[in-house]
Amino acid sequence: MADYREMWKDLGMDVEQHDVLCEVLPQAVGDVFLSQENRPERMDYFDFVLAEVHGVRPAELVEFKKNGGKVFGTFCAYVPDEVIFAGGGIATGLCAGSQFWVPGGEKVLPANVCPLIKASVGARLERTCPFFRLVDVLVGETTCDGKKKAYEILANDVPMHVMDLPQMKREKDITKWAEEVKDLAALVEEQTGNKITEENLAANIVKFNKKRQALERLYAARKSENLPISGTDTLLISQIAYYDDPDRFTEKVNVLCEELEKRIADGFSVFPAGTKRILVSGTPMAIPNWKLHNIIETSGGAVVCEETCTGTRYFENQVDESGKTLDEMYQNIASRYMGINCACFTPNEARIDDVLRLAKEYKVDGVIDCHLKFCGLYDIESNAVVKALQAEGIPALALETDYTDTDAQQLKTRIEAFIETLN
Ligand code: BJ8
């Protein structure tokens, strides 16, 4: 990584501690990504973004702020980026995926909270992530209990706005979410001093639909019998989607897709024939959490799809572009986002339907349903997911993990055994 120490100091970071994190990144990137064979050439952009993860994008955001811009940190796929960008702000995903930050979170949270929450709180309070330092406002949401309580802690340290996400999907809940989207718009206007107009909101609805379409195109390539890209590489792209500039990201994904489509036409695959096709479902994998994909893809499997928020839940379904008034657009945005099926909703059969549908669309040999430790929502729902898959004759394995490496060998043993049973 280039030298960004001055920027990090200016952001009030603990640069010495942060150095410890920077030291392990090149090794992890080498082990997980560069060791793969036959990677698409156009992964070069995403490799660069990863190599400069705490440098190049934070530097852009710092520059944006110098010119009066406001940056909004988010933690969930339900928070609509369209609204933040329409108000001239920038949204950046903040969910943290490294064990490095967990002990810092445990100083203020019980140990039995999911690692994603502990790491996110630790990254802010320990001052070891530039994204967490440079945001002007955090936008939380009432999804799981752990996040709700963590937001109260973070609110002591940084301005916080929490969106009240309904937990059911009746018509009145979607209308309520549209009201929350409107409140977010008011917050963005107040912070940025800009007005959200019909024109700029419509333009941003189109912008983010294009971004989702690019990801849909990327995932469509993974439906092919010959896999032109690994699941590990695709996961990295999904993680970068949360914080990269949206227009540039869309363009780079589309350029990559051209290469992947050519590979498919040429009958080229990154995996040998007979590699088992796996759908991963469950909790999101925030950067740099690549553990599960890495284990699966070094154990005779290929991850062909993720039913997670670093997967299909992020990009499936577009916002209806026909809205003319702001109210119509907020309602259309609310409808699209309420179509995401997170385990925080009840009842949640639609998520089970999604898993079954994706298993068929991506012609998988088996499903690995994996949740982060202490995530009660996805842990409880796992039983129903596995039962529904088995009823359809689709082999399924339920797993639980965290951000440490201590269970890696045990996971590998279980995953290898599962893959061996797939015919
Ligand atoms: S829409 S999955 S991004 S809430 S893993 S913090 S649920 S205890 S991340 Fe999520 Fe939004 Fe749902 Fe997606 Fe809580 Fe579970 Fe931890 Fe989680």
Image (cartoon, grey):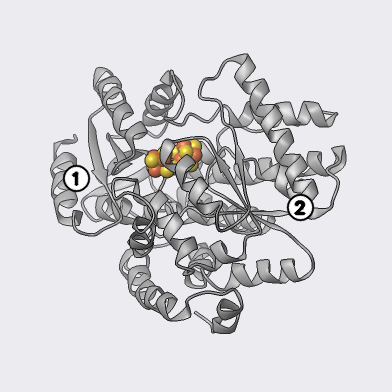
User: Which secondary structure lies at badge 1?
Assistant: helix
Q: Looking at the image, which residue is at 36% across and 59% down?
A: 107
Q: Which mark is residue 237?
A: none
Quarter-of-image position of residue 121: bottom left
Quarter-of-image position of residue 130: bottom right
Q: Which mark is residue 415?
A: 1
User: Which secondary structure lies at badge 2?
Assistant: helix
Does the residue at mark 2 contact the one at mark 1 (Cβ under 8 Å)?
no
Q: Position of residue 270 (x, y in %)?
A: 36, 55
Quarter-of-image position of residue 37: bottom left
Q: Looking at the image, which residue is at 25% across and 42% down?
A: 400
Q: Which mark is residue 191?
A: 2
Above-or-below relation of 389 to 142:
above
Q: Looking at the image, which residue is at 62% across and 15% down?
A: 171
Q: Nearer the viewer, residue 184 or 357?
A: 184
- The three-letter amino acid code for the residue at tag 1 is Ile
Q: Nearer the viewer, residue 410 or 167?
A: 167
Report crowding for label 2: few under 14, some 14 to 19, many 20 or more residues within 10 A (C-alpha): some
Q: Is mark 1 within 8 Å of ligand 1?
A: no
Q: Looking at the image, which residue is at 41% across and 19% down?
A: 349
The answer to whether residue 205 is left or right of residue 72 is: right
